[in-house]
Amino acid sequence: MYQRILLKLSGEALKGGTAYGIDPQTVLTIAEQIKDVHDLGVEVGIVVGGGNIWRGKTAEGLGMDRAQADYMGMLATIMNGLAVQDSLEHLGVPTRVMTALPINQVAEPYIRRRAIRHLEKKRVCIFVGGLGSPYFSTDTACVLRATEIGAQVVLMAKNKTEGVYDSDPRTNPNAKKYDELTFSEILAKDLAVMDSTAASLCKDNRLNLIVFNMNTQGNIVKAVKGEKIGTLVKVE
């Protein structure tokens, strides 16, 4: 069983059945799964996306300045992180929200040594604000934070997707799911798992990745225990 993990939650996962925004019941369901992992004694870091509220790349396509759009996306991740914190603390799980984008009224600034100390004290650390700089995705932020805190694995929780496929399973019913891949294969085949910067960081830092469907109850615990679910992306 992994002892310290970094869980990547997509913003889309927090909207539940709604078109956009945050669905409180969905967030609570996710928090219950995280609590199950925390109760095992595992140290948990979380990086939250913001796609349920705002996407910088989409706004850029509509003519907005990319840097401005990305900063708005960072603010969206802070909102999502606070929602996850609220649900976890309602369940009795101690948390800290740490942000790369300074906003002292609602979250601590991200400091690596402080984050590690929080984890050692069994507090769930929710990392928000991306990297605090535009042009970097939350995937890249996720891998960088995992490397900084010494996480043993990155768990990429997907919304209604069982793992990594050779094509989009939502449009191609014959899409093939991979049980195992290497980061070199992801980069060579241009598979839509994470952006190339994040994949290269995983490869260079020898950090494995598990991609799985978070909507199946108990999947996060199974991933933490090393059970075979989703797709394992490993360093060759």
Image: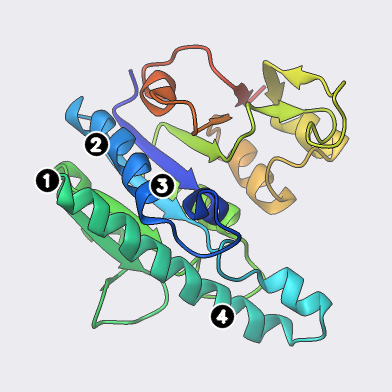
* Mark in the foreground, 3 or 2: 3
Which of marks 2 and 1 precedes in the sequence?
Answer: 2
Q: For the residue marked with disc 1, what is the amino acid?
A: Gly
Question: Which residue sits at x=85%, y=25%?
Answer: 173
Total numbered circles: 4
User: Which badge, 2 or 4, comes first in the chain's sequence?
Assistant: 2
Judge whether 56 appears above or below 219 on screen: below
Q: Is residue 24 left or right of residue 92?
A: right
Judge by depth and name the residue closer to the eye, 106 or 5. Answer: 106
Q: Please report whichever mark, 4 or 1, sits nearer to the chain's N-terminal start.
A: 4
- Tell me the amino acid under the disc marked 3: Thr
Label drawn at residue 26: 3
User: Which mark is drawn over residue 92?
Assistant: 1
Q: Position of residue 150 (x, y in %)?
A: 37, 41
Q: Is residue 110 above or below residue 34?
A: below
Which of the pair 79/113 is nearer the observer?
Answer: 79
How far apart marks 1 and 2 lie (CA) works out to 9 Å
Q: Which residue is mark 2?
A: 35
Q: Determine the CA span between mark 2 and mark 4.
A: 30 Å
C-alpha distance separating marks 4 and 1? 32 Å
Instruction: Name the residue tied to disc 4.
Output: 71
In the rendered image, residue 57, in percent from the top left (x then y), is placed at 73, 70
Closer mark to the observer between disc 3 and disc 1:
3
Which image quarter holds the N terminus? top left
* Amino acid type at mark 4: Tyr
**Do the numbered discs 1 and 2 sit on residues whose CB atoms are within 8 Å?**
yes
State whether residue 115 appears in this view.
no
